[in-house]
Image (cartoon, grey):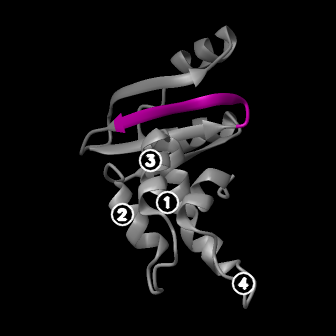
Amino acid sequence: MRTYIVTSEKFTGEIEFRYNDIFQLCGYDNRADFEAVQHDWLLKNLPMSPACLHKVASIMKGKAIEVKTELTFEQFWKSYFAGRTKDNSSRKRAEAKWNRMSKGEQAKAWGYINTYMSNIAWGTAPKHAETYLNSELWN
């Protein structure tokens, strides 16, 4: 099973598409706030494969992020502090924020960690993990 989350500036929320092991659409959840025209368009252009999904996401002025597995807070925490010591970040506050985020936001936050860390100015400490999440720096 492969899961993709589609987000866009053209709508709020997200759309989750699920494909089986032979890359056929087996389900989707629309958690986006669409206008009727957008909803009709999506139904007429349902991406039946991941390859089609990227074309549809592009037309929607959005992007599709593959979520290989259900992302856990533990995966986020380990990635955020990979190769460096843990600062005074509050694990409890960061986890509470993580649990309030949608799957799409979790995927974007997790996927942006390396970009964020590589763009921090030399001599500047990274933000606390909970600040990273609360500030939505991936946006």
The residue carrying pointer 2 sits among few (fewer than 14), some (14 to 19) or many (20 or more) residues within 10 Å by Cα, namely few
Which is more N-terminal, label 1 or label 2?
2
Which element type, helix, strand or loop, lies under badge 3? helix
Q: Nearer the viewer, residue 21 or 33?
A: 33
Q: Nearer the viewer, mark 3 or mark 1?
A: 3
Horizontally, residue 19 falls left or right of residue 115, namely left
Q: Would residue 137 be counted in the magenta stretch? A: no
Which is more N-terminal, label 3 or label 4?
3
Residue name at image x 55 percent, y 32 percent: 14
Residue under label 3, please give it: 96
Residue under label 2, please give it: 75
Residue under label 4, please give it: 124
Q: Is residue 56 in view from this perspective?
A: yes
Which is more N-terminal, label 1 or label 3?
3
Which amino acid type is marked by label 3?
A: Ala
Residue under label 1, please give it: 110
Q: Would residue 17 be counted in the magenta stretch? A: yes
Q: Pointer 2 and pointer 1: residues touching (CB < 8 Å)?
A: yes
Which amino acid type is marked by label 4?
A: Thr
In three-dimensional space, the C-alpha distance between marks 4 and 1, rounded to whole angstroms, equals 21 Å
Residue name at image x 55 percent, y 44 percent: 54
In three-dimensional space, the C-alpha distance between marks 4 and 3, rounded to whole angstroms, equals 26 Å
The residue carrying pointer 4 sits among few (fewer than 14), some (14 to 19) or many (20 or more) residues within 10 Å by Cα, namely few
